[in-house]
Image (cartoon, rainbow, N blue to C red):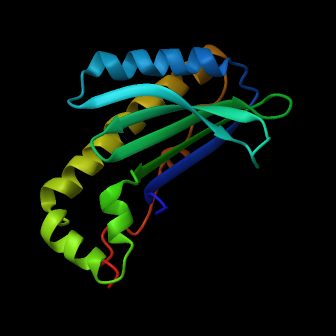
Amino acid sequence: MAQPELISHWNQLIDGLDHSSDAFYKALEAKIEERRMPNVTVDRTEFAEGGLFSARRTYLRVRRYELTYHICAAPFGKNYFFFSAWLHGNTGCLAILASIPGVGLLIRLLIRPLTFYYIDSTIMFQSAVHELLMAEIDGLTKAQNLHPLSGEQRKPILSEFYAKPKR
């Protein structure tokens, strides 16, 4: 099966934050739904922490067309709370076909070209969800008298989004 195309990643560990993952997800879901972003759906999904029989971790899943944002909020050890966000393109029939040498180039050029609209709408979706994520974290840190995240701590790490397609 083809791996999803990673577009961006962000994570932050916050010392002293005490909160429920479920409560965080509910608050963020409400913020996202309040914005009524077109063609955006929100639900939850679980991923194994390790192998087949390992514990499962719940993520908030925000989707728009072939884009999926997975957001994790979880306690980590004593007095730590961890956040992560992964934006990627979904796997599917096109993604599987695109992984075939030669066919991938044709799909990228003919069926799903890298257009200004595609790039703009991807960045717009990423920016909107990330902004709401930061706003929810800001509310938590302020309520618990913790230092807000710095500008550098807020920045997602972008992948080679504009890279030429592999031949």
In the shown orientation, is residue 109 left or right of residue 141? left
Q: Position of residue 103 (x, y in %)?
A: 27, 77
Q: Quadrant of residue 104?
A: bottom left
Q: Position of residue 88 (x, y in %)?
A: 42, 52
Q: Position of residue 110 (x, y in %)?
A: 13, 70
Q: Residue furthest right?
A: 78
Residue sitting nearer the eye, 3 or 146 = 3
Residue at image coords 79%, 41% = 53
In the shown orientation, is residue 85 left or right of residue 38? right
On screen, residue 152 above or below 56? below
Residue at image coords 29%, 30% = 40
Q: Position of residue 167 (x, y in %)?
A: 32, 85
Residue at image coords 37%, 76% = 100
Residue sitting nearer the eye, 66 or 145 = 66
On screen, residue 167 above or below 157? below
Residue at image coords 22%, 70% = 107
Q: Quadrant of residue 65?
A: top left
Q: Quadrant of residue 5?
A: bottom left
Q: How many marks?
A: 0
In the shown orientation, is residue 116 left or right of residue 11? left
